[in-house]
Image (tube, rainbow, N blue to C red):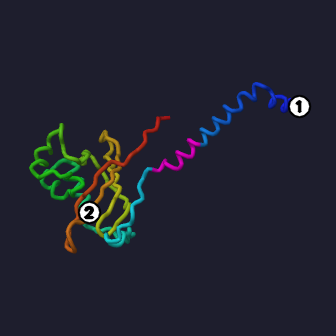
Amino acid sequence: MSAIAGALSSRRFISLLPWFAGAILVAGLVTFLIVFFGNTSKVEPINKAAGPPVRSVDQRTVPLDPKISRLANQFMRIAVGGKDAVKAYEISGPGIRQGMTLAQWKRDWSNPDVGVPIIPYPIDKVSASPFRIDYSYPKQALLEVALLPKKGAGIKAQIFFIGFKKLGGANGHWVVNYWAPHNSIATPSQ
């Protein structure tokens, strides 16, 4: 008799065989229950009365409206530089205003504990602000603007995203709807 045949016919193996079979049966039962009852979401019938499904439409890109670059410079000079609360409110869109009224905006403009949702930057110390167009659509645009400080200004250059939205109909006007720094990962100096 071989060693394997001897081990399989031993009293100890034969007494443990029902326990192994039971464990395999329980594992199979648990697996079945998880697979069969694991998806608890309900299958909802399609409501055809709600109309046709909304399809996402690829927006066509358009050349950047010259008004956008002028508005970007105005926003950075007035709002980011902290010059005029009322004018900054007028050229800011709902994404920046965040539901604030003009009275709230003016109240919080100079309060460092509250402030308005515009990340400041010392614009007076900027020598250049080149930008790159991320996208330009008929009713929205996004630029990346690099604020490059003058030599000896003591501040670091920073890249910001600035987003624009066109409000109104055919004769609508552009507003700045987004202003945030470009994320950068700090790397150790060598």
Start and end of the magenta stretch? 29-39
Name the image quarter holding residue 178. Answer: bottom left
Position of 169 compared to 62: left or right?
left
Q: Which residue is mark 1?
A: 2
Q: Nearer the viewer, residue 114 or 10?
A: 10
Residue 150 visible from this viewpoint:
yes
Q: Amino acid at mark 2?
A: Lys
**Residue 183, above or below 49:** above
**Local SS, label 2:** strand
Q: Secondary structure at mark 1?
A: loop
Task: Say above or below: 145 vs 183.
Answer: below
Instruction: Identify the residue position indicated by label 2 in the image.
Output: 165
Q: What is the x, y in percent for residue 160?
A: 33, 51
Q: Is residue 145 above or below residue 26?
A: below
**Point 37% across, 71% down: residue:** 60
Q: Residues within 10 Å of mark 2 (few under 14, many from 20)?
A: many
* Residue 24 in magenta stretch: no
Q: Is residue 61 visible?
A: no
Above/below status of 106 relative to 24: below
